[in-house]
Image: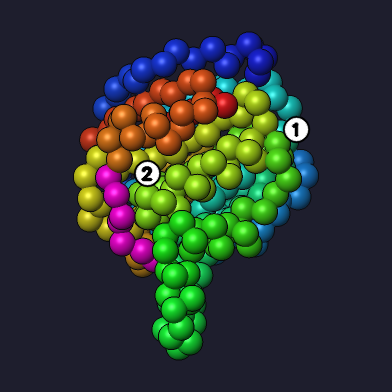
Amino acid sequence: MGFLNKLGLSMGSSTTRENTRTLPEERKAAGGKHGPPAVGSSRNPEMQGTSRVSNGLKEFLWNLDGLGRGTLLDLGPAWQTTLNFFIERGFRVSSEDILRGWADFYAEDEARIGAEKTVENYEERLPEVRAKRFLEKNLQYNPGSFDALLLWDVLDYVDATLAKIMVVQLTELLRPGAVVLAMFHSKKPEGFQRYRVADTTTLQVLSAKPLLPAQKIYQNREIQELFGRYRSMKSFVARDQLRETLFIK
């Protein structure tokens, strides 16, 4: 079925139960031999973790089926496995590790403001002022650049003000009918995790050194308000306290 024919997702949520299993050591990822080149440097695929069946990913790919040579923005590390997966399907992939960028920006901003110690600079600590300053140098793409977005659990780790402004900016970067896959923790996470795509129904979940503490646990109503400009939302809840949510612009 073509891409445009598959955009009629109904509002509401569906719940599935998923299992995790230990991953064997990952084979060295093959270089991308098909499709356009990816934007962003790749990550060394040496970490091990667990795998999880992802109904959200399956639905995400189902909605992109038939699109052809689309464009995708990945807001996590540029894992070679994820890059290869989408490149081999004809996508042009841009990767921007927005959490690392925000962590580095925040630390440098705090150091600068603390050193200068002026009234004006202290006002720069206001959440909205700081968020806008950060986004002036990040997520800088032309409006309507992308057909798909992998948001992961980014919003759980940034303050609520930045999350709100970031969603607005990301929405502008997406074309009408674009698909977003996001994750939300249903309780405070015990550790920091990264994600990469293993196959059409499986994500690899990798434990990593924390970049930021979790900032907020979103309720369903709050998620709907954040993505109020999107015409469809569908959620999948798993045993590992992660809610995968799909949005259609």
Q: Secondary structure at mark 2?
A: strand
Residue neighbourhood size for the residue with mark 1, other residues' Cα within 10 Å, grouped as few (<14), some (14–19), many (≥20): some
Which residue is at a point 34% across and 27% down the rendered structure image?
236
Identify the amino acid type marked 2: Ser
Residue at the image position 76 percent from the left and 50 percent from the top: 37
Q: Which residue is mark 1?
A: 69
Residue 145 screen position, x and y as percent: 71, 40
User: Contact (CB < 8 A) between labels 2 and 1?
Assistant: no
Q: Nearer the viewer, residue 149 or 136?
A: 136
Upstream in the sequence, badge 2 or badge 1?
A: 2
Is residue 60 something one can see in this rendering?
no
Q: Which residue is mark 2?
A: 51
| Relative image position of residue 1 (x, y in whole percent) | 64, 11
Residue beneath the point at 34% across and 41% down: 184
Q: Magenta stretch: dominant SS?
A: loop
Instruction: Quote the CA–CA distance across marks 2 and 1.
Output: 28 Å
Q: Is residue 106 above or below residue 182?
A: below
Question: What residue range appears in magenta?
Answer: 211-217
* Local crowd size for mark 2, using a 10 Å CA cut-off: few (<14), some (14–19), many (≥20): many
Three-letter code, disc 1? Arg
- Image position, residue 243 (x, y; %): 33, 35
Of labels 2 and 1, the one closer to you = 1
Q: Nearer the viewer, residue 81 or 104?
A: 104
Above or below for 137 versus 183: below
- On-image quarter of the C terminus: top right
Q: Is residue 146 left or right of residue 183?
A: right
Q: 186 and 114: which one is in front?
A: 114
